[in-house]
Image (cartoon, coloured by chain):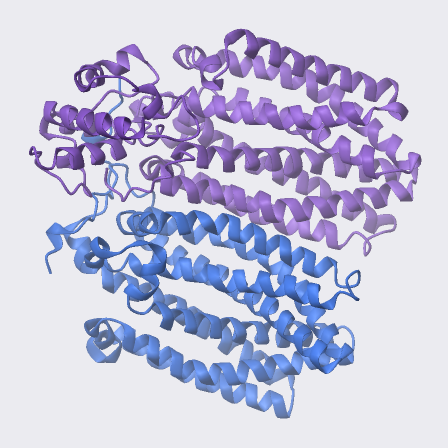
Chain colours: A blue, B purple
Amino acid sequence: MHILQLAIPPDFPLPIPGNLSLLEFLIVLTFILHIVFVNFTLSFATGAVALEGAGIVKKSKRLDDMARICSFHASIHKSIAVVLGVAPLLIVSVIYTQYFYTSTLLIGKAWISIIVLLITAFLLLYVYKFSWEKWENKKGLHFFVGLVASAILLFIPLIFIVNIVSMLYPEKWSSANGFFHSLFYYPQIWQRYAHFVLASLAAGGFYMYFYFAWKQKKQPLSDVEQSLKMGGVKVTFWITLLQLLFGSLLLISFRRDIVLLFMGDDLLLTVLLLVSILLTIVLCGLLYIVTKKDTQNVFYASVICFVLIVALMGWMRHEVRESYLQPYMDEHPRTLDVQKENVQPIK
Amino acid sequence: MDFPIVEFPWFGNGNIVALIAIIHVLISHGVAIGATAIVVSTEYYAMQTKNAKLDQLAKQLTKWIVIITTTVGAMTGVGIWLSTMVIQPDSIGSLLRIFFWAWVTEWVIFIGEVVLLLIYYYTWEKWKKGKEKQKHLNIGITLAVFSWLTMAIITGILAAKLTPGRWVETLSFWNAFFNPTYLPSLAFRTFLAVTLAISLFTIFVRLFVKDKDVRLPLFRIFSIWGAISLPATFIFGIWYLKSIPEQAAKLIVWSTGLPEQTFNVLNLIAFALIVVFLIWLVIRPKKLPAVLALAMFISAIGFIGEFEVVRESIRKPYIIYNYMYVNGITAAKAEAMNRDGYLAHSTIAKVKTITEENKIEAGREIYEGQCLACHTIDGWRSKRALANRLQGWPQKSIEAFIPSMHQVRPMMPPFVGTKEEVEALAAYLYKVVNEQN
């Protein structure tokens, strides 16, 4: 690799403000929190639209009621998803400045468009939620509003994925030509996207199961709520099974030496991957049991399993980035202590 | 020039951030902070006077606070940051290094603010009576405090850009945060938020709240808050004004782009307008003319636009005062670049050594790195468009002007680089200016 000719800038002379290991721990933790709420938002918004659409076709009030509950949860979780996203973005900016700023600037206009896209999607989600009764006779329009909001929400992750994938490939920067070109230029983008969208559906289904199981302890569920709960479990079960395939597709889209790290070259990564696959199979088993016989113990076990899988995924995601960037970081060190001579006042 | 350049040739790079920032200040100050304080007072007043209809109006207003702040408000807040990453990466990157933990703290409080806001709105009907109503009100009060706290933290960062104070010597976080304009600007913004909320919301109340039983008590709450906030905004505004650097104060009128007399007249009219408006609200709330409320709404937006533009522009030629110029160049970089060349120290520059063949290309790269932060070639703001400013200039004059421009125009940073680079920049500017004209 001709690392020296790459457009990796020198780090700022002001030091990274804190212990690197602590910041790495925080980025994994806060990213997981953020992405889980993004998953919820995305699955409830798309789920609401799908259910409403099915309700219109089948003329089913029941499906419409289920859709409405989904839309309510979507609009609450989207607010949390956005605020939780600030922390990982802060940390990635601070500890990977040389890579992340460059990859952001390479798709600068798409990056800025996130602001307009999200505002539009969020406002539409409110219209969608608050006009459910008012537009009862304008079902087509109402459905369309939800559809547009969901389409925007499905598009935005691509911008983030291009950005964080592009930062891993400094040797490809010089030929990158904006966001749309990058979508098909960098490896692993669509594999990541598929893995993410499926994870969203699974997380959304799991949330429904979790939320209504919790609610059930206080009061009996209505028929519609029961359908959402059990529907959630089924969605999560099937999607999680699929994830075993799509997760593998993502893994093999990594650079060869990184793939091998997960296959014995690095003990930690290999163990992480094996445990996560094992837990995924266990979760599928638990969810299958739930569909047959819903008990408290299985419920708790599945929650623990789910949380562990999400944590492992977040951790591995971080390790992938570290492995990709390691050779560059050796050549282009980060500023850990202040470079006093480079931080002078302008008099 | 260490990061790829993104150019908005017509709109102007600086204007992108300004536009987002203006919208954000309107919402964060006027809605999230000011309107929340008013809504919570309204709930309290409704409790005291047992006015159920007023309570419902407070709930309706809260719904709008939820809708506006969690969409446009939150996203423009994050948006200022997303867009400065693209437009001013050196500046925002450095600020993140200095103020990281302040931002983290602000983030934690911001999560609290959003969660409290959602609880406050969605429990309105659930916690309706007796002790539960008191609990609901307490959540509202905590929410108002949290919204203010997020501003109290961000203000430290914003104020430090204009007056980093002792930080430039000590590099101490606390010196940067508690900088010379921190307290005055925080006090000013606090009361500005309330004044702004009244100015923005009155027109909607006037037009859409028909019931006199709720409109009049609400106007009464507006006028009580206004009687406190307007004089306080004025007094703290003067304190703030007196505490900014002299060089910056001189740029205030210039930065609005208005002739001094027009500037004075406009600001006086706006001030007179708000005084008349408030007095009217106190004396004859029943007969408040919609036109007056509308005028308030428009002038409030105008004032915030002016405030943001001035606040950003008077910092020139710096982006972080006495540390970094508006084009991201620091003292240490300037020294190295004057010695070895601007392009030699620019990571992404394709031209490293200037020849007759690549001169124009080199000039373009220097333009992008050093001028683009404020200028366009032919953008809509003609004062910043070089096709306008340099029209009719011979290439030699441009070349002679560049090295001394910061002395003639103190809002411009000094050119950084070698003599060959000056020539290359002049050649490029001469070419594009004449192509445009």
Give coordinates of residue B431: x percent, y percent.
22, 29
Which quadrant of the rendered structure holds the N terminus of chain A? bottom left
Q: How many marks?
A: 0
Farthest residue toward the top?
Answer: B261
Give coordinates of residue B399: x percent, y percent.
18, 19
Q: Nearer the viewer, residue B405 or B304?
A: B405
Apparent side of residue A247 relative to residue A66 in the rendered image (left or right): left
Residue B139 visible, this angle: no
Which quadrant of the rendered structure holds the C terminus of chain A? top left
Residue B61 visible, this angle: yes
Give coordinates of residue A314: x percent, y percent.
40, 66
Based on the displayed image, in which of its 4 quarters is residue A13 positioned?
A: top left
Q: Nearer the viewer, residue A225 or B263?
A: B263
Measuring 63% from the left and 77% from the top, which residue is drawn there? A209
Q: Does residue A116 lie above or below B345 as drawn?
A: below
Q: Nearer the viewer, residue B302 or B320?
A: B302
Apparent side of residue B113 relative to residue B382 in the rendered image (left or right): right
Q: Does residue B228 lie above or below B109 as drawn?
A: above
Q: Does residue B310 lie above or below A281 as drawn?
A: above
Measuring 24% from the left and 75% from the top, which residue is drawn there? A259
Apparent side of residue B42 relative to residue B417 in the rendered image (left or right): right
Give coordinates of residue B421: x percent, y percent.
14, 27
Based on the displayed image, in which of its 4 quarters is residue B58 positioned?
A: top right
